[in-house]
Each structure stands twice: as structure tokens, then as C-alpha cells.
Amino acid sequence: MNQNLQQPHTSAAPALSMQGIHHAFGRHEVVKGIDLEVLPGEVVCLLGPSGCGKTTLLRIAAGLEKLQQGRVTLEGKEVARSGGRHLPPEKRSVGLAFQDSALFPHLSVLENVTFGLKHLPAGERRHRALTLLEQLGMAAHAESYPHMLSGGQQQRVALARALAPEPHLMLLDEPFSSLDARLRDQIRDDTLHVLKKVGAATLLVTHDPEEAMFMADRIALMRDGHIVQVGTPRELYCNPSDPFVVTFFGEVNELSGEVRDGQVLTPVGPWMPAGWPRAAPRGCW
Ligand code: ATP
């Protein structure tokens, strides 16, 4: 394990910084020049339609996908550079939880969560795992085996397992998407609570704008390999930089019109949009 990456979370440097990232599968470029930062303790949601490159970007941050172009740093330390350094995922001190995060079937819930804590004394290992299971409402299942749990319960355990080693950065890929609506709300709520309590910087991939609005300190909205806008949920909702941002967050009424003398002539009358030619802001709270 790289000792430099095991220092406490005292650095003011971004927990994650990705600079000038490009990535292609064969001739298909799916990430097209992305710069993104996650600050210490911050939850950033990578939001966008299916196929826009979210998971690829997350996998590059984790080290699961070899960087082709750009630079990745964790707390100011370079972990990947194109044509050069590539620190493997297990040396990056990141916690990973994916939609289909598999638990070890032959280990109990408690053993699954303590798995990454072998460097700690047994008592501390157990205490840390039980504390997290408690926070995620799973302490009563500590002695159960994965096949005895529902999908949602398994996801909570996967999350506890990812959080247990106190990673500097959590990378979550659609961690709630296989849950039914009611359970999803509850687990999102619990997860956000734990992430904030432990102060874990988090990059969370989702295609669900409501989820991003609920979870994120900042949202990075992606389309076709680019980031269209980064900002707080309120900034994206109230001050969209592009019509795509407006349509992504809800139903819109579209009117065609003709621009003449600083006005748009529409079938329902003339209109002068605020901030023209940018997207018109919504009425905001
Ligand atoms: P979703 O929300 O559907 O998971 P996404 O935004 O996470 O989508 P990615 O999974 O990053 O998108 O995929 C981006 C593009 O790259 C897609 O067109 C996908 O088919 C392609 N792609 C992803 N992984 C590979 C791979 N290993 N080999 C070839 N193409 C890939």
C-alpha cells in the first residue's frame, strides 16, 4: 500500500482532480476533454443520459480503466498520467460501490465489511464494521450471509464495506438503481447521512436528475463525452447554461419563433427572454 495515500484527510487539495481527460474505445471517443474536481467532504454527482461516458470517467478515476490522455490526482498526488504513471486501483485508497457490487458469498455480513481492515486489531475491526452497519440500519444482520439478504440490504452492506477502510474518496456507480422506489429513497437518505458523517469525498454516477438534486453538493451534467455545466443543484436548475440543462431537469414547453428587433415572435405573441441568447432561467425559489 502506498503510505503517502494513507495520510489523514487534512489536505486542502481536491480529493480528486481530473484534468484534460480523453478516452476512446477503438475509434469511438467517449470522453472528450473533461476537467473535474471533487473537494474534500464534497458529494459530486456525475449526471447524464445513458452512454454519455459517466461510468468510463468513474472507472478512470478508480484506475479500473487505464488513462489514455490527461492527468488524475488524489489529494494532490498524481496517480495517473497519460503515457506514464498508473497506480492500480487497490493502491489508490478509493472506496468503490457499483450497482452490482458482489459481496463475498461465503463470508458473513460482518466478515464482508471487515475484509479490508486486516491491518487493524480484531477488536477495532469489529467495532468499526458494526458502527457502519448500525448507521446503515444493518447491524441486526451482522451474522447473516449475503444470500439471506434482499437486494437493498446487500447494497447497504456493499456500501459499508466500501466505507470501512475510510477511503479518501468514494466512487459510486448507480448504487441505488436496482432498488424499488420506496427503498431507494430510504437508502439514499441513509447513505447521504453516512457520507456526510464520515466526511467522505464522493463522486456518484447517476442518470436520475432527482437523485442528483437530492444527493449532490455539486452536479456535473454530461452529454456526449463533455461536461455541459458544473454547479450546485440550484445553479443548474435556476441558471442553466444551455437548453439541454433545462430539458434534463424537467418537462419544458418548446415554442418555435423568429428573432426580430431583440424579440422572439412566437405563435402566442412576442417575447423577450432574460439573458438571451442563453436558456431562459426558471422561476426559482
Ligand atoms: P449508462 O448510464 O448507460 O451506464 P454511461 O454514461 O455510464 O452510460 P459509459 O458506460 O461510460 O456511459 O459508456 C460510454 C460509451 O462507451 C457507450 O457508448 C458505451 O457503449 C461505450 N463503452 C463503454 N465501455 C466500453 C468498452 N469496454 N468497450 C467498448 N465500448 C465501451
Image (spheres, rainbow, N blue to C red):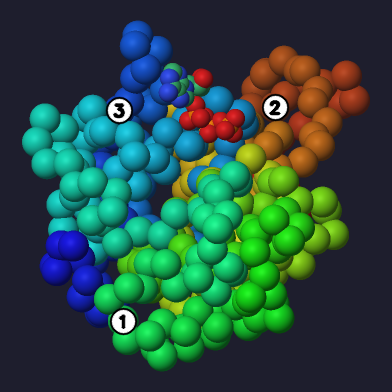
Left or right of 168, for residue 179 = right
Badge 2 element:
strand
Q: Is residue 47 above or below residue 191?
A: above
The residue drawn where x is 58% and y is 55% is: 105
Q: Nearer the viewer, residue 263 or 245?
A: 245
The residue drawn where x is 32% and y is 86% is: 121
Badge 1 element:
loop
Q: Is residue 268 above or below residue 80?
A: above
Q: Which residue is mark 1?
A: 120
Residue 85: percent from left, percent from top: 11, 41
Left or right of 200, for residue 186 = right
**Assess mark 2: CB under 8 A from ligand 1?**
no
Q: Is residue 246 visible?
A: no
Residue 255: percent from left, percent from top: 81, 23
**Which badge, 3 or 2, is on the more N-terminal residue?**
3
Badge 3 element:
strand
**Disc 1 and disc 2 in contact, CB within 8 angstroms:** no
Label 3 neighbour load within 10 Å: few <14, some 14-19, many 20+: many
